[in-house]
Structure formats: structure tokens, C-alpha cells
Amino acid sequence: MRTTGMGRWIATLVALVAVTGCTARAGDTDGHRSPVHIDIPATPDSGKDKGSGKDDKGDGKSSGAPATTRAPAPEVLWARGDKGVDVREVQARLHQLAWLFEGPTGSYDGSTVTAVEGFQRKRGLPRTGRTDTVTWQRLVKMTHKPGKWELYAFGGQPAAKPDPRCMTGRALCISKTSRTLRWMIDGRTVSTMAVRFGAQYTPTREGVFSVYFKSRHHVSTIYDSPMPYAMFFSGGQAVHYSYDFAARGYAGGSHGCVNVRDEGAIASLFAQVRTGDKVVVYW
């Protein structure tokens, strides 16, 4: 049997439908459109706007992977305005690395902020001037734990308990253990200050003495060095202000005198002490 042209066309159409899964629709009467309409199955992404990355709900939310969260900033341990022994340790460690030249004061001031910023910059850390956990760990790794006289290289240490001989009358109560001087009247502490003593071959004598001579602008006749606010108590040994102690701290020593580095404190003390007042030097 011969197959007509129409029969061949129908057979082709049936085969196409079987292969593509499309549906056949009757052609339009004007003869200008294809008699076949192909329905393309929906895909999971078909509801998205390919140009904007938004889904067809229009809410602007992406259905992609969740956004990553930023790691929290390290905890700040010490910053400008803080005070105390912990701050002294930060400063002493910075001093070891030559980032801080003044020595520990126990006060997190502008010089400390600048030193911490320099240390952070050198190590590629954020330059905040604050000592956070990361900065502190790096600083500890590069330095040794400071000893007592590194923490108090320029004074500021607490005074030792007064010697019992200081508890009566008017007394300059001087402790070699804490390197401090207490000015006491009838057992009450009026003021305290850091002091420095003689070196190994010129030690400061210990015992109970009395002030026998005062000289506001004294100059040593032996060493030709200034001894402002001198209060002599034993031979040529005196309590006096020391420019060297003010500049170098405990890195140096005296020729036997008791040095004071706080000029304002000793000026006030000099004005109050009288000839005959007691001086007690003890461990």
C-alpha cells in the first residue's frame, strides 16, 4: 500500500512527539504558524531572574551558600587611662625592646599608646595602641618576665612597714628593702617617696641618726656634684635630690647618700624637716 504525503507527515509528527515529550496542537487557520507547540518542562532554576540574582518572589534574598561570619576582634586587656601593676609589666616589656624609654609608671599614658602602636606596626598587627590578647601574646613571647626593680625602675613601689623606732616623734623612716622613705610624725605617715642608696663600695649606713645640718643649694666638696635640698644625718651622708636618679632610676647609685628623684616631694619635705629630727635607716 502506498503512503500518501499526509500520512508521512503524520508519522513524522508522532515520532517527534514520542522523542521530545511535546504536545501537538492544531495549526492556526492562517497557515503562518507551526502546527507543533513544544512545552519545555520547568527546571528548579526557572523561577529566578538570571540578570539580577533574585528569585521570582522579588524579596532580594539569595538562595545560595550562607554568608561567612567575621572572626571577633581580640579582647582588649589594657588601654589608655588604665593603671596598676599589670600596666607596669606591659611597660617594662616594651622597655626591654626599646619601644618605651621612660620606664614603667603604672599609668597607660600617651607614651605607652605610642610605644604599643610602634610595636604593633612592626609586627603587622592592627595599630590600635591598645594591648589586646594578640599583642600581649606576641610581647610576652619576645621578652622575659620583669623583676621587681624592672617594674619599679623609676620608683612608685609601695613603702615597707615602718620600723618600730619610727613610731614616735618626728622621723625620716628609710627602708632599704622597699627603697622608700616615709616622713612620719607621732606614728602617722605624712608622705612617702622612692629613694636610692649608695653603691657597693660606698654603702649607706644603717642605724638611728638625726638631722644635724640642712643646705638648700649644697654642692659636694668631694665629688663636686650638686646636692639640692640636702639634709645631713651621718658624716657626709645626706638625704637630697638627685638629678641622676631622676634621669636613670635605679640603674645608678649614690656615694652613700639617700637620693630622692621627685623634686617636688623633697622640696616639701625639706621645708618640714627640722634640725634634730630622727633618721632611721633599716632593712
Image (cartoon, rainbow, N blue to C red):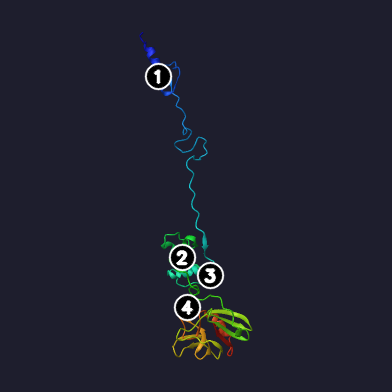
The quadrant of the rendering that contains the N terminus is: top left
SS of the residue at dot 3?
A: helix
Q: Amino acid at mark 3?
A: Val
Q: Amino acid at mark 2?
A: Val
Kindly identify which residue carries mark 2: 140
Q: Amino acid at mark 4?
A: Tyr
- For discs 3 and 2, the disc positioned in front in the rendered view: 2
User: Real-space Cα distance between discs 3 and 2?
Assistant: 16 Å
Residue 100 lies, with reference to residue 21, above or below; the image says: below
Do the residues bearing badges 2 and 4 touch, measured as CB atoms within 8 Å? Answer: no
Do the residues bearing badges 4 and 3 touch, measured as CB atoms within 8 Å? Answer: no
Q: Pick whichever of labels 1 and 2 is earlier in the sequence.
A: 1
User: Real-space Cα distance between discs 2 and 4?
Assistant: 24 Å
Kindly identify which residue carries mark 4: 250
Do the residues bearing badges 3 and 1 touch, measured as CB atoms within 8 Å? Answer: no
Kindly identify which residue carries mark 3: 85
Q: Pick whichever of labels 3 and 1 is earlier in the sequence.
A: 1
SS of the residue at dot 2?
A: helix
